[in-house]
């Protein structure tokens, strides 16, 4: 119930201009924006954010790699970098992030070149 309320409020904020997501930048699932693509942030779940934070912590602690909080592009860079690393903990957190994302974000991650082409999540697009 709370997740539905959070999603509803998040989408209302995006349409009313109360958030950092401008109405012209908000895209429906599968839509493309002129500045580089699909918006991830409006579709993020609380659990997805949690696993993204854990993934960021692992990458910072083990590899010294930091990512600025600049929105969607930073998330894409983080996911792309993590998908190239053959570390069990990194791959576990990436998988947990993927599994706890909304179906719209999962579809986007499988269809775009955010993940490395040889990554097992990008090859799962045909399977349900």
Image: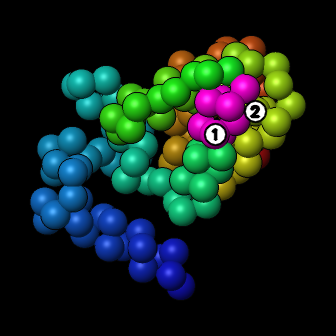
Residue 112, placed above or below residue 46? above
Q: Is residue 27 magenta?
A: no
Question: Residue 94: which quarter of the image?
Answer: top right
117 on left or right of 76: right
Q: Which mark is residue 57?
A: 1
| Mark 2, secondary structure of its residue | helix
Q: Position of residue 124 (x, y in %)?
A: 75, 33
Q: Position of residue 102 (x, y in %)?
A: 56, 55
Q: Which mark is residue 90?
A: 2
Q: Position of residue 52 (x, y in %)?
A: 59, 45
Mark 1 residue crowding within 10 angstroms, few (<14) / some (14–19) / many (20+):
some
Residue pictured at 22% horizontal, 25% vertical: 34
Q: Is residue 50 visible?
A: yes
Which tag, 2 or 1, sits closer to the chain's start? Answer: 1
90 on left or right of 32: right
Mark 2 residue crowding within 10 angstroms, few (<14) / some (14–19) / many (20+):
many
Q: Nearer the viewer, residue 59 or 40?
A: 59
Q: Is residue 56 magenta?
A: yes
60 on left or right of 31: right
Residue pictured at 30% horizontal, 64% vertical: 11
The main secondary structure of the magenta stretch is helix
Q: Nearer the viewer, residue 5 or 82?
A: 82
Over which residues does the magenta segment extend?
A: 55-62
Q: Is residue 121 visible?
A: no
Residue pictured at 62% horizontal, 30% vertical: 60
106 on left or right of 125: left
Q: Which residue sits furthest right?
A: 88
| Mark 1, secondary structure of its residue | helix
Viewer-nearest of discs 2 and 1: 1
Question: Residue 39: which quarter of the image?
Answer: top left
């Amino acid at each position: 119930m709370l997740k539905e309320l959070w999603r509803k409020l998040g989408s209302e904020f995006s349409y009313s201009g109360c958030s950092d997501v401008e109405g012209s930048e908000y895209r429906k699932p599968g839509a493309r924006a002129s500045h580089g693509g699909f918006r991830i942030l409006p579709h993020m779940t609380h659990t997805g954010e949690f696993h993204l934070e854990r993934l960021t912590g692992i990458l910072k602690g083990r590899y010294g790699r930091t990512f600025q909080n600049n929105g969607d592009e930073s998330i894409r860079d983080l996911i792309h970098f993590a998908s190239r690393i053959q570390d069990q903990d990194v791959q576990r957190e990436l998988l947990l992030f993927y599994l706890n994302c909304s179906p719209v974000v999962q579809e986007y991650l499988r269809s775009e070149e955010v993940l490395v082409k040889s990554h097992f999540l990008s090859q799962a697009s045909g399977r349900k």
